[in-house]
Amino acid sequence: TVMGEVEYKRRIYQTEDDDGKSMYVHLLDQYLKKETIGHVSSNLVEKIVENVLEQSYRKSAKNIESMCHNSLSHTSLWNVVQELGDKLENQERKLIDQYEDGNINGEREVDVLFQEADGVWINMQGEDRPKSGKSKKKEMKIAKFYEGWKKRGNQKNAYLTYNRKIIAGFGKARDFKKLSDATIAKNYNVDEIQYRIINGDGDPWIKRGI
């Protein structure tokens, strides 16, 4: 945890899932509603993600050790981030499945919804590097939707969008479109949206979203 290590004892139980396959559970973890990635608490995971977004895994490990008194290697941090990514990906898949089955519809109602989409090219390493071509970069697709804008403080020509949501991913255009639509449906009653204002630079994957 962010306060250091917390040790406790627990029993592991063998049971079966709905398909009759053997599985193991920790009832104490379920009772405590413990949210972890491996043995790392969710609040420490948040600190790890904040660090690796700004610096290398090695520097992040040193920073976490000095800040939270946890001795985690840079490899451990990498594993935590990968597992977190897998969990988020599974959540996105479930959301898309619910949307395609017509089982999701948000409560918020608006007449107009603004949408923006763009791509950011990022240098990749290792297995994530593009398999074809000489480029080491890969495009991350980013989409944002919001309800309007308001002035930023007392600044005359500065504005902030409000009630905004942002999604991002490296998936194919079709999959990213599904995620975007499912995220909107999760937040809004889409039947009440009369107009969608879509802004983009004309890239083919953005045009497909129209």
Image (cartoon, rainbow, N blue to C red):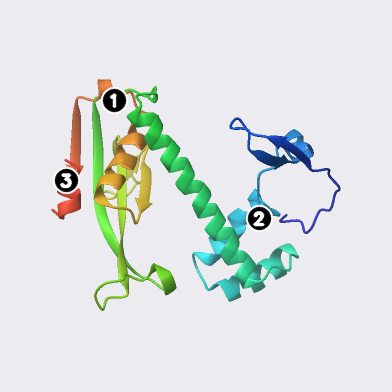
Q: Amino acid at mark 2?
A: Leu
Query: Which residue reaches farthest right?
Result: 9
Q: Quadrant of the N terminus?
A: bottom right
User: Is label 3 in a helix, a strand or a loop?
Assistant: helix
Judge whether 126 appears above or below 92 on screen: below
Say which residue appears at 30% left-offset and 55% top-offset: 141
Q: Position of residue 65 (x, y in %)?
A: 71, 69
What's under tag 1, amino acid-wise?
Val
Q: Position of residue 38 (x, y in %)?
A: 67, 54
- Residue placed furthest toward the bottom: 134
**Mark nearer the viewer, 1 or 3:** 3
Quarter of the rendering occupied by the C terminus: top left
Residue 179 location (% of width, % of height): 34, 41
What residue did someone put label 1 on?
190
Going by the numbered disc 3, the residue's amino acid type is Arg
Task: Give the mark nearest the N terminus, 2 or 3.
Answer: 2
In the figure, is residue 118 to the left or right of 122?
left
Q: Is residue 76 above or below residue 172?
A: below
Q: Nearer the viewer, residue 48 or 34?
A: 34
Which label's residue is closer to the chain start, 1 or 2? 2
Q: Nearer the viewer, mark 2 or mark 3?
A: 3
Q: Quadrant of residue 208?
A: top left
Residue at label 3? 208
Residue at which label 2 appears: 44
User: Which secondary structure lies at badge 1?
Assistant: helix
- Report how far apart the C-alphas of labels 1 and 3 lie in the structure: 19 Å
3D distance between C-alphas at marks 2 and 3? 39 Å
Q: Residues within 10 Å of mark 3 (few under 14, many from 20)?
A: few
Q: Is the residue marked by circle 2 packed among few (<14), some (14-19), or many (20+) residues within 10 Å?
A: some
Q: In this view of the protein, can residue 2 be seen by the observer? A: yes
